[in-house]
Amino acid sequence: MDGEIEKFIMYLAVERGLSTSYQSSVRQSLDALRQWAADGDHLLQDIGTEELASFVAKRKDESLGNSSLRILVVHLKVFFRYLTSKGHVIADVAEPLIAPKVEGYLPDTVSVELLTSLLESIDTMKRLGKRDRALLELFYASGLRLSEICQLRLEHYDSEEAVVRVTGKGNKTRLVPVGDAARNAIEMYLRAERGDLVTSKTSSHVFISVRGGALSTDRVRSIVKQRASNAGIETKMYPHLFRHCFATHLLENGADLRVIQEMLGHADISTTQIYTHVDQKRLKGLHQQFHPRG
């Protein structure tokens, strides 16, 4: 098993381009599997679904929480999927494993109406209004991570196609559409305001500060919080909330989960599936509210 684990970690690094932190997390899971197999004299070829379920149960007995167990199961699935594709095992024995539910966590979201009121409250005739409107419009239109927004450069934005090219976690590049509202806001900012912020030290970052440098993550958090306060919104607003709303609102309007996964840049569909629970919660709420016997 040692050799196969090392080959798999190399595959994650070279072929998948996944981050060192992700590789370390996978290695930790597989090292535990290797130790369990050695303790029980299990050969890789002899491990089936029942044995993997016993291994997961043992980790649970060792006080591993449900969130960590879910990650463990995902790592087992991708490892055995890899082994099956390479012909090192006959069948994908990890596929039937069911990850434990993580109770009590659902991503925060707000309504389309609240987000619209926030966006439209920004006065683009005032200083930095065009920048901040473009910034928040892009957050909601694209579902980009905070770091991805801050790192976005002019050469990554295609105004004609209305897409941004993003390099996210694991150095994976994806194309994300931005839509007409965000494109119009970005074009207005680039045409009528960004030039006033440029200094001799300004790089090609799309969103820059009053000093001409790229906006920091802390500054963007502050902008979101201040704009929400200016709009009289009492709900806690933060950059990642826009990403949650992007995915949830797409799902509510019928978008395919695989498409949402691609736009969010999730490596595994199980990460994206959390938004189906948000939509189910909304549907249950509507049923209770409007059904005569809800």
Image (cartoon, rainbow, N blue to C red):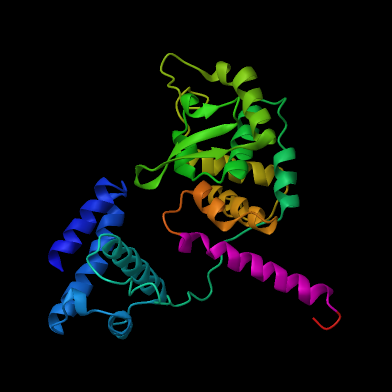
Quarter of the N terminus within the rendering: bottom left
On-image quarter of the C terminus: bottom right
Residue shown at 59% from the left, 29% from the top: 161
Query: How many numbered marks does the figure carry?
Result: 0
Picture quadrant where residue 162 is located: top right
Q: Quadrant of residue 188?
A: top right
Q: Which segment is the magenta one?
A: 269-291
Residue 129 horizontal/vertical position (percent): 66, 30
On the image, the x and y values in percent for residue 205 come to 46, 27
Q: Residue at x 63, y 24 (%)?
A: 187
Please tell me which residue lies in front, 204 or 158: 158
Percent across and percent down for residue 41 are 13, 83
Towards the viewer: 69 or 172: 172
Q: Quick check: 81 left or right of 195?
A: left
Q: Residue 289: within the magenta?
A: yes
Q: Is residue 141 above or below residue 77?
A: above
Q: Is residue 263 magenta?
A: no
The residue shown at (69%, 34%) is 180
62 to 32, vertically: above or below: below
Q: Position of residue 138 (x, y in %)?
A: 60, 38
Q: Is residue 123 left or right of residue 175?
A: right
Q: Residue furthest top?
A: 200
In front of the other: 224 or 259: 259
Would you say residue 17 is visible in this rendering?
yes
Residue at (53%, 69%) from the top-left corner? 105
Determine if residue 128 is in view: no
Q: Is residue 45 left or right of residue 282?
A: left
**Magenta highlight: main SS:** helix
Q: Nearer the viewer, residue 213 or 175?
A: 175
